[in-house]
Image: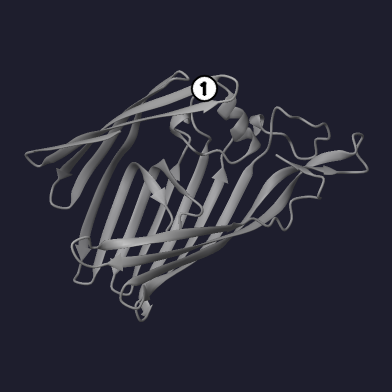
Amino acid sequence: MLLWLCFPIQAVDWGGSSTFFATVESDDDLDWFSEGLLALWLNAPLGPSYSMVSQGSFRATTDPLYVADLDLLYLEGLSAVGERLAVGTRAGRFLLDEFSGLVFEHRGDGVEIWLSSRPAVTRIGAVYTGLLLKPNSAVVMSKLDEIDDRDDDVRLAPRRLVAIGEVQFVEPLPRTDVTLAVVVQQDLRDSADLIEEGETVLDETSGGLLDTRYALLGVNGALGTRWFYALSGGVQFGRVLAYVPDAESATGARYAYADIRSYAGSIGLEHYVPGPRAGRWGHCIPVAILIPVRSGREDAATR
């Protein structure tokens, strides 16, 4: 059930949404789960070029779980610089993503700047996830993230910094756009929470850092007059703590950081339907290939 409300009052737009869903699973006994979400949003212009956007929500489940959260709160603006360049800014708590959707799409607290011109659109942004409430966060990447996710005493999301740089070239080829992006994810946990590199005793209650880097390429355009395509792919680099064999240690193994590498890609195809029901109809076919090139030995336990 989805209910939308929107009431313009003077120059301020505000509204809300209500969502409810339920699931039932049956093995020996019926397992019932339901969740309701109420969200209210506000968009307030601040002069001719800037506006303030905010959204708060209340979520309740049968777990039980009750969470009131500030989902969005950011200042956004767009200004013209001359006749051929526009500069946009966004600061506060907002949704940061890269063009492909393969790597990162999440809320955070930070800043984003973009430059728009005829040849290209360039943007850079960075957010910090450590101030988000854990129940409303999907940032779970490492073993320590999983441990904190199960710990009721941990209230906030993992402390990670995510930065994105992206350039979209507008029609360098006829009816074709090309996008390049770089994503950097840095684990900002305190050293006191980590297993030290070189430790020899297996520890299932802790873990290490997980830092990653991504390089992405996307191509999208038209096939004829009614078909549109989107191709994207990328490579991931990074490091992860692994428990690797070591003949010289007393336990036969030790903790060490190892390089990781993986690949991912996606294919999208849309069809445009003209007439009274005009719009694009199509399918996106995600193709994900994860091939670790180096992450310790085959019998190593990554953390």
Asked which secondary structure carries label 1, the reply is: strand
Q: Nearer the viewer, residue 36 or 131?
A: 36
Residue 143, image quadrant? top right
Is 209 on the left-hand or right-hand side of 274? right
Quadrant of the drawing holding the N terminus: top left
**Rendering coords of residue 28 (x, y %):** 60, 20
User: Considering only vertical position in the picture, is 92 above or below 23?
Assistant: below
> Which residue is denoted by mark 1 in the rendering?
31
User: Considering only vertical position in the picture, is 135 above or below 223?
Assistant: above
Quadrant of the drawing holding the C terminus: top right
Residue 23, image quadrant? top left
Amino acid on which disc 1 is placed: Asp
**Rendering coords of residue 9 (x, y %):** 8, 37
Q: Residue at x 25, y 68 (%)?
A: 85
Residue placed furthest toward the left: 10
Q: Residue at x 53, y 24 (%)?
A: 154
Decide if residue 109 is in sight here. Answer: yes
**Rendering coords of residue 249 (x, y %):** 90, 38
Q: How many labels were placed on the picture? A: 1
Q: Nearer the viewer, residue 286 or 233?
A: 286
Q: Nearer the viewer, residue 128 or 40?
A: 40
Decide if residue 190 is in sight here. Answer: no
User: Considering only vertical position in the picture, is 46 above or below 225?
Assistant: above
